Image (tube, rainbow, N blue to C red):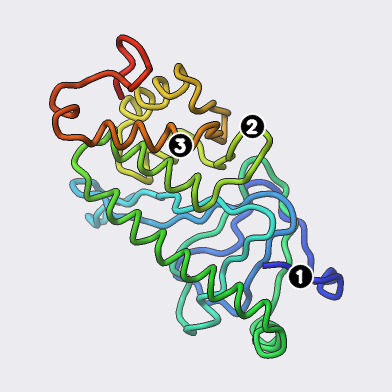
């Protein structure tokens, strides 16, 4: 979703770690990222735990749903359906982020008078719905290794930023594991093998997918029943490179 220079006066700089809004809050503004990254995360229940304060309620974790970059928008649902925020938005650790803050009235006028913005909004909302469906399907998969690989492929395809050497996904290993419900050692096992066959590289707060086709090939290979049962190696990966 692009904006013209007339909206520049609505830009604000948010330092790294800034909470733009929290899940459950009422919202009267939406946001468009001009520079930097913003994590969208949501509280999820954790059975068997205790919430802080000893009240006996179930404990919760923060699960990263997406990391958005320049040109992306967020926070529009609170305006469209007049309901509390369904997730928390936090400026990523590589901040600061420069963000346009657009109130409900101005957003409504943009949608009414700018056909291009309206079409892009509809397409983006449809893509997000498809991405949410994909995440549900991933979480239903029994094999944590497949969940890690599927989750990474989903993020790269939907939110990855094109670079000269591949698609950069602004998510850490820990955040990826939390998103797909995989243990740290399971995430590290899969990412380690993908690194060794040069499909990805890992940064402190990002994963770069260098070859999407090979990543999808490895995922398909992993999910073949006969291969899955036998623990076969990555195709072309050599001995010991099974996912």
> What is the secondary structure assignment of the residue under circle 3?
helix
Residue under label 1, please give it. Answer: 3
Q: Position of residue 100 (x, y in %)?
A: 73, 67
Residue 149 in which image quadrant: top left
Q: Which of marks 1 and 3 is in front?
A: 3
> What is the secondary structure assignment of the residue under circle 2?
loop
Q: What separation in Å lies between label 2 and label 1 (alpha carbons)?
A: 28 Å
Label 2 or label 3, whichever comes before in sequence order: 2
Label 2 or label 1, whichever comes before in sequence order: 1
- Residue appearing at x 76%, y 70% in the figure: 3
- Residue appearing at x 32%, y 22% in the figure: 234
Q: Position of residue 80 (x, y in %)?
A: 52, 83
Q: Which of marks 2 and 3 is in front?
A: 3
The furthest residue to the top: 239
Residue under label 2, please give it. Answer: 165
Give the label on residue 201, or none: none
Q: In this view, does 50 lie above or below 202?
A: below
Residue under label 3, please give it. Answer: 213
């Amino acid at each position: 979703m692009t904006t013209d220079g007339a909206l520049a006066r609505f830009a604000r700089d948010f330092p790294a770690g800034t909470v733009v809004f929290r899940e459950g809050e009422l919202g009267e503004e939406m946001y468009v990222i001009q520079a930097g990254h913003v994590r969208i995360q949501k509280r999820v229940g954790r059975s068997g735990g205790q919430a802080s304060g000893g009240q006996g309620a179930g404990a919760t974790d923060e699960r990263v749903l997406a990391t958005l970059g320049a040109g992306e928008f967020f926070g529009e649902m609170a305006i469209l359906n007049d309901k509390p925020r369904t997730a928390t938005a936090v400026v990523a650790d590589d901040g600061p982020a420069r963000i346009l803050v657009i109130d409900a009235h101005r957003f409504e006028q943009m949608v009414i008078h700018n056909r291009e913005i309206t079409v892009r909004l509809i397409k983006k909302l449809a893509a997000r719905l498809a991405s949410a469906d994909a995440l549900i399907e991933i979480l239903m998969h029994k094999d944590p290794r497949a969940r890690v690989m599927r989750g990474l492929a989903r993020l790269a395809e939907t939110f990855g930023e094109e670079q000269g050497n591949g698609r950069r996904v602004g998510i850490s290993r820990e955040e990826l594991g939390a998103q797909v419900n995989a243990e740290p050692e399971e995430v590290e096992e899969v990412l380690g093998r993908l690194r060794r066959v040069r499909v990805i590289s890992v940064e402190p707060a990002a994963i770069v997918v260098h070859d999407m086709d090979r990543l999808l090939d490895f995922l398909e290979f992993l999910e073949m029943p006969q291969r899955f049962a036998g623990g076969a190696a990555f195709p072309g990966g050599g001995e010991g490179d099974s996912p």
